[in-house]
Image (cartoon, rainbow, N blue to C red):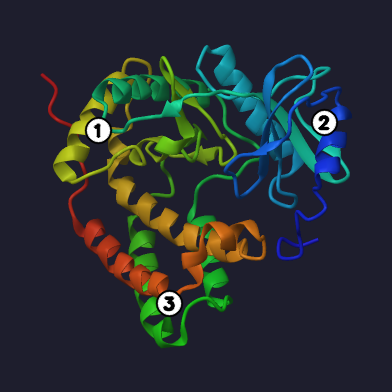
Amino acid sequence: MSDAQFSYEHLTPDTLLNALESVGIRPESGLLALNSYENRVYQFQDEERRRLVTKFYRPQRWSREQILEEHAFADDLEQAEIPVAAPMKIDGETLFNFEGYQFAVFPSVGGRTFEVDNWDQLEMVGRFLGRIHKVGASKPFVHRPTIGLDEYLFAPRKALENSSFIPMHLENAFFADLDLLISVLKERWTPNVNTLRLHGDCHPSNILWRDGPMFVDLDDARNGPAIQDIWMLLNGDRHDQLAQLDTISEAYSEFHDFPANELQLIEPLRGLRMVHYMAWLAKRWEDPAFPRAFPWFAEAKYWENQVLAFKEQLAALEEPPLTLAPQW
């Protein structure tokens, strides 16, 4: 069954409950759907009054081996006393199958949103990222992918060309600017950069805060340059980003060598994410959750803004990369 043919319509409340009961978990409360588009994630309380979360993985996306590598990485991080949402082991297993759906169960972790403009929080996140990458560098993923141009540029470009989303009056301008961006990104990409196991999608919404950070959602974990887990934490103008970068790098360096030689990859990685994101939405549009969550994606205004975004990203790629402040 292809991605386009796949539907979650058979993942009914009864299926969810039966799946959980098949591994000995009996929900006492209703299943509260949490914000997740790629997978289906629900929070509940079981008969032992534990607050738990279950994730039903989107079929055809990750193989069993790839999901188990995600779980093993989370376990490695947890063993290193890094606060991460790791799946529970039930009879020694973390991944289960029910009627074609692969699923896992996690302790529910609460917290407020990480504040990117809070310097104390940013410093602590930088420290933990250094620890995460120290663990991640100990061995690579074998089954999960490595960030590269095929997945993030070439396949998305083809998917967009084969879609019907780009308005006809914008097609020439859209693809001309997209191809120019792809050409520049190919020139700026460094294929031989050192890679390690990454969180992969370490944006502020995937960091919860209570007494410290809690890193959640390793669903996009893969091999890649360390800077991938850092650049999404930077925001504001260049002056702001330089200050944030210095704060992160100083804390990060307490546990792992900061990848200063990868700073020139920040804008290329931003460009890759931009192209990949558009194609991801197009690819998932048949899932009813996507039109509900992203109604603007089917509007001409969105695609007009993307043409402008391409030009802005091309300009950003011409700017000198961020640099660390001199150390005395």
Q: Quadrant of residue 255?
A: top left
CA gap between label 1 and label 3 equals: 36 Å
Residue at the disc numbered 1: 245
Tell me if residue 118 can be seen.
yes
Marks 2 and 3, Cα distance to the nearest angstrom? Answer: 43 Å
Q: Secondary structure at mark 3?
A: helix
The image shows residue 252, relative to residue 277, as above or below, that is: above
Q: Reading the chain from its start, which is encountered first: label 1 or label 3?
A: 1
Please, what secondary structure does the residue beneath circle 2 have? helix
User: Does residue 193 sit above or below 109 in this rendering?
Assistant: below
Name the residue type under label 3. Ala
Does residue 159 appear to the left or right of 23 in the view shown? left
Residue under the image location 22 percent in, 47 percent down: 321
| Mark 2 vs mark 1: in front | 2
Kind of residue at disc 1 = Leu
Q: Residue at x 29, y 37 (%)?
A: 261
Residue picked out by circle 2: 20
Q: Is residue 293 left or right of residue 307?
A: right
Assign the C terminus to one quadrant of the image.
top left
- Which image quarter: residue 274? bottom left
